[in-house]
Amino acid sequence: MVAPPERYDFDAIVVGAGPAGATAALVLARAGRSVCLVERGPFAGSKNVYGGVIYARILDELIPGWWDEAPVQRWVTRRATVLMTDHQALTVDYRTSAWGEPPYNGATAYRPDFDAWLADKAVEAGAVLVTSTTARGLLVDELTGQVCGIRTDRPDGDLTARAVIACDGVNSFLAKEAGMYLHPEPEHFTLGAKEVLALPREEIEKRFALSGREGADFEIVGCTQGIPGGGFVYTNLDTVAVGVVVSLTGLSASGIRPEELIAGLKAHPMIAPLVEGAELKEYSAHLIPEGGYDTMPELTGDGILVAGDAACMCLAAGIWLEGVNFAIGSGEAAGRAVDEALAMGDTSAAGLAGYRRRLEGGFVLQDHRKLRRAPHLVLSDRVQNAYPTLACDLVEQLFTVTNPVPKKGAVKAFLEGYQRAGLKVGDLARDGWAAIRTFG
């Protein structure tokens, strides 16, 4: 607890210069508010690890024509879902030229570049970016009990503000200190690990059948040695990222290291030709909030909001990962809610209630609520292990020429495969209905 500030340093402090924090600071600065964007690393994006595709259409109105200046590697025009066993792969491969032109659908990018670009937009609008600074805790007004700033590790001391927006990443320390983080259990998190492998640009385009700025994104089930999760392969201009996203508790129980899973994926008959001869440039790993809607913290408190990964706003289900778009969307909503609260002169939880209303009215919470069951379904044992085996074996039997022995009928082959996969009567129907309820 601290005495009420006689004068606030800023209208708002945003902790964390990732996509959520940079967007919140940009919105507030454009509204004419004094805002400090605090980043622990030496520059925005310096701590980030990311293995996937950025879906940045949320920027269409915020930064019109963003695709002309954002540091994008490739535009994803080819997206494939792969069901895999240790020696088989069945792929649903979709590609379209429409995704290779404005307004685009998804892009691959190096997060340090992308995050620094977005933070620069906030600085251009008037935000103050303070780097190499750790928020060590919250300042709380001893009279009102309201958050009024942050404690820092800087020699010049703490920073005060009428509102704090916590964008300090997964397992947010600030949200925990404020009593807002209700579900810190390890089963609600996954570990994402990846290798970035260097290959000549022309070799990547030949191997993945791409040209120009076209990019590919493969999402893989059945490549994690029985640990709930999934794998991915995606292309940058002159590197390929290969990685896995696995259950934290499952990984711990298995005794397998994530780099072993990546090595196994790279050695698979489908993936090996794509990465042969590549040079390892980077290995990295980070936690991902997997639990989604049902594990989100309280989003508002007296003088504080939580956004982005700090609020578990990441749609993650093994092979499927969206986070940057939700971070930007929640950051924008947080910035507008704080601006509204400042205009009313009330940054208590009641004054900041517009934040949740904005999230509920837009895609961030609507998509999370709709897909709240997705992690449980996608990470289930049947989806992870039984169905890839069933699908791969069935297609192999149908395409195998057995002369002089007559071919098995498709129904017989399916029923035999169903039994070999360890499936029981009704499993497929139950999971099909669950998929309709989840994704329909």
Image (cartoon, helix red, strand yellow):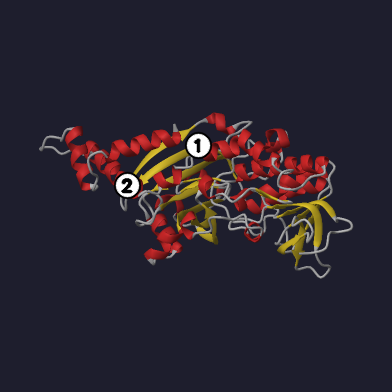
* Mark 2 crowdedness (10 Å alpha carbons): few <14, some 14-19, many ≥20: some
Residue type highlighted by circle 1? Lys
Horizontal and vertical percent for residue 62? Answer: 72, 36
Instruction: Classify residue 408 as left or right of residue 351.
Output: left
Residue that protrudes farthest toward the front in the picture: 143
- Residues tagged 1 and 2 counted as in contact (Cβ below 8 A): no
Instruction: Classify residue 319 as left or right of residue 399.
Output: right
Residue located at (74% from left, 57% from top): 145
* Mark 1 crowdedness (10 Å alpha carbons): few <14, some 14-19, many ≥20: some
State whether residue 124 appears in this view.
yes
Residue type highlighted by circle 2? Arg
Is 262 placed above or below 55 here?
below
Helix, strand or loop under label 1: helix
Residue that protrudes farthest toward the top in the picture: 98
Q: Split into 4 quadrants, where in the image is the C terminus? A: top left
Q: Residue 102 sits in which quadrant?
A: top right
Q: Disc 1 and disc 2: Cα gap in Å?
A: 22 Å
Horizontal and vertical percent for residue 238? Answer: 57, 50
Residue that protrudes farthest toward the bottom in the picture: 155
Residue located at (74% from left, 43% from top): 351
Is 261 placed above or below 412 here?
below
Q: Residue 16 sits in which quadrant?
A: bottom right
Residue at mark 2: 382
Residue located at (19% from left, 38% from top): 415
Question: 304 or 57, which lies in front?
Answer: 304
State whether residue 118 appears in this view.
no
Q: Nearer the viewer, mark 1 or mark 2?
A: 1
Residue at mark 1: 370
Helix, strand or loop under label 2: helix
Q: Split into 4 quadrants, where in the image is the N terminus? A: bottom right
Instruction: Classify residue 194 as left or right of residue 116.
Output: left
Horizontal and vertical percent for residue 282? Answer: 56, 61
